[in-house]
Amino acid sequence: MAALQAGVWGVGSLLLLSAAAMAADEPAQEASESAPPSLPEPANGVAYPQGWQDWALVSVSHRTDNATMRVILGNDTAIEAIRAGQTNPWPEGSVLGKVVWKAVSLADWSSAQAPGTFVHAEFMFKGEGQADTGWRWARWVGEAQTPYQLSETECVACHSPVKGRDWVFTTPAPLP
Amino acid sequence: MAALQAGVWGVGSLLLLSAAAMAADEPAQEASESAPPSLPEPANGVAYPQGWQDWALVSVSHRTDNATMRVILGNDTAIEAIRAGQTNPWPEGSVLGKVVWKAVSLADWSSAQAPGTFVHAEFMFKGEGQADTGWRWARWVGEAQTPYQLSETECVACHSPVKGRDWVFTTPAPLP
């Protein structure tokens, strides 16, 4: 488990080293032009979970009531908890991400529903949570990842039916 | 890009070191009992793509014609190609995995379709391919990951409608 986290930190360190090496080889102006874009602003008091695009799969869903496709991803702590079968409660530090697109028919297989326009990415952070839930929710909207202004009750109210599942709708998909 | 690959190999190395350290602390018999299970046998002449459960997301789909949920994952080469916008053709070494479950209604949100029983995981390997496609296909069935005996024409015939998209149905989902 620690090895997995160390590995991921290793990637970050290598990327930083790589960026530093590139910068050293280039004139100052070019290095500045090639600097990575800044992270989106925090939402609901939570820092943007950088690198979630590389997180491993938890599950997928197709909400037919609002025609959206979703994938649920987890940070290392969440994935380790799933593989250990210990997700009720989820351990401190778990982050679950839900990535949402409008559903469209796949161009070459019309009976398949697939992602169209990106809608938002929203996250649950286990730790010092909202309203004694143990979780804090946050959402970033559109490809620009604009912080969404949540009310304190909005997420908690919607997730109340699954309070007995540690406030999580998703059941991790079975994997070999 | 090299850093990303180095990072992933780093995880593998750390896990091996971790396993070796655990084995050193335990009596020989227990170490043997806790040894990881062997990999599934090759399918269609291709070695099992170990570690695909940690690969990053390419897309998702819900096939309404056979009531299955799918996620499409990519190895590092495939994910790098997507982020560089260079997927027609996909570069040598790309591997795309499609993970398939029977679709069921989510227990606490009945209008959401979600993964039920695991069906199979199937992969496309870019390189020395079948029938001049540049790809080799392979499938492992069920949670036991039993190699599936493909005929030489089975995959190629189904993928022929997307020959002009380098034989790939999936369009990578847009991500911020």
Image (tube, coloured by chain):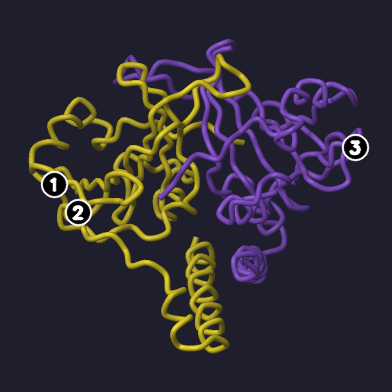
Chain colours: A purple, B yellow
Mark 2 or 1, nearer chain start: 2
Q: How many marks?
A: 3
The local secondary structure at tag 3 comes to loop
Q: Which of these two is toward me, A19 or B30?
A: B30
CA neighbours of label 2 inside 10 A, class few (<14), some (14 to 19), many (20+): some
| Residue B116 locus on image (x, y percent) | 44, 31
Residue A116 visible:
no
Residue under the point 65% across and 30% down = A169
Amino acid on which the number 2 mark rests in the picture = Ala
CA neighbours of label 1 inside 10 A, class few (<14), some (14 to 19), many (20+): few
Residue under the point 33% across and 67% down = B38
Residue under the point 29% across and 21% down = A108
Question: Disc 1 designates what residue?
Answer: B149
Question: Disc 3 designates what residue?
Answer: A132
Q: Which mark is residue B43?
A: 2
Which chain hosts label 3?
A
Residue B60, above or below A17:
above
Q: Which of these two is toward me, B102 or B135?
A: B102
| Residue A69 locus on image (x, y percent) | 53, 23
| Residue B143 locus on image (x, y percent) | 36, 47
Amino acid on which the number 1 mark rests in the picture = Gln
Looking at the rendered image, the quarter that the C terminus of chain B falls into is top right
Which chain hosts label 1?
B
Q: What distance separates the C-alpha of mark 2 from that of mark 3?
A: 50 Å
The local secondary structure at tag 1 comes to loop
Q: What distance separates the C-alpha of mark 3 from that of mark 1?
A: 53 Å
Q: What distance separates the C-alpha of mark 2 from that of mark 1?
A: 7 Å
